[in-house]
Amino acid sequence: MKKTDYSKIAKIYDDNPVRHYGLPDSDLVKYISDTKLSSYNILDIACGTGNYLRFHIDYFKSEKINWHGIDLSYDMLKIARAKLPEVEFIEEDAACLSFEPDMFNYVANNLAFHHFEKKSKVLDEVARVLKEGGKFKVKDISPFEMQRFWVYQYFPSAYFEDLNRFWEPQLLFYELQTRGFQVHIQLDCKIEELLLEELLRDARKRDASQFAIISDEDYQEGIDRIKYDLKKKEKIVNEFCLMNCIAKKL
């Protein structure tokens, strides 16, 4: 399994509008609405530059919440700390958390579970630090349902790398269930046409993890494929599938 070096893209990471939140985490909203606790401890695992935390700190400003974020990238955390000096950020491995048992009400992991080399250990740690009745939210893409994702069409080596990095939803469900979680996983899949000109512009940024883990040669060949197709057509058909997993610790 190849790892993404986020020190190379940290400075341009926030330039992509896709990485900024316009809507709140609906599962977090429901959890706070249902529990109505006097205070909460919430952890964002692999928090990156802190966009999830920044949006929700503002959204839940009327609630008493202690926000925490961890990430392995010093460069990403440097940006997060500058945005949110009030948040406790720790540079550490999600497979070996420094927090006390039963500390958190809610643990979030957004579009990053595939980066963990020791996924089973991460789930062990989440189960350890989460309170009884607490929720664990995993949001990620599911390559197994989106073989015709535009990135995979033009950069096929990225697809085979992702098969090594991602867990199938069924495996995640089973692994959480065996750790005493009540699990619900929903796949939101769509097929649509996308403009090749816009895809070329996105690919040239090379700020997605799929582009970071393939060779320079494979990357340039993919750029050339897009340019070639642009001479013949304006759009391609794209498959995309987003997985939302919410697990309650029993």
Image (cartoon, rainbow, N blue to C red):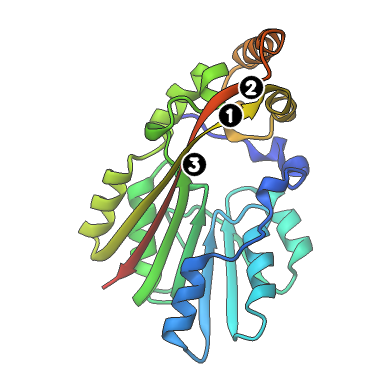
From the viewer's perspective, tell me whether residue 193 is left or right of residue 76. left
Residue pictured at 40% horizontal, 37% vertical: 166
**Residue matched to label 3:** 115
Image coords of residue 196 (percent x, y)? 68, 22
Dot 1 and dot 3 residues touching (CB under 8 Å): no
**Residue matched to label 1:** 193
* Residue 155 appears in the picture as rendered: no
**Residue matched to label 2:** 235
Residue 128 got which mark? Answer: none
Task: Name the element at disc 2.
Answer: strand
Residue pictured at 43% horizontal, 74% vertical: 100
> In terms of image quadrants, where is residue 234?
top right
In the foreground, 29 or 66: 29
Question: Disc 3 marks which amino acid?
Answer: His
Label 2 vs label 3: CA separation? 31 Å
Please tell me how crowded label 3 is: few (under 14), some (14-19), or many (20+) other residues with Cα within 10 Å.
some
From the viewer's perspective, tell me whether residue 87 is left or right of residue 210. right
Task: Name the element at disc 3.
Answer: helix
Dot 2 and dot 1 residues touching (CB under 8 Å): yes
Image coords of residue 198 (percent x, y)? 72, 28
Foreground mark, 2 or 3, reads 2
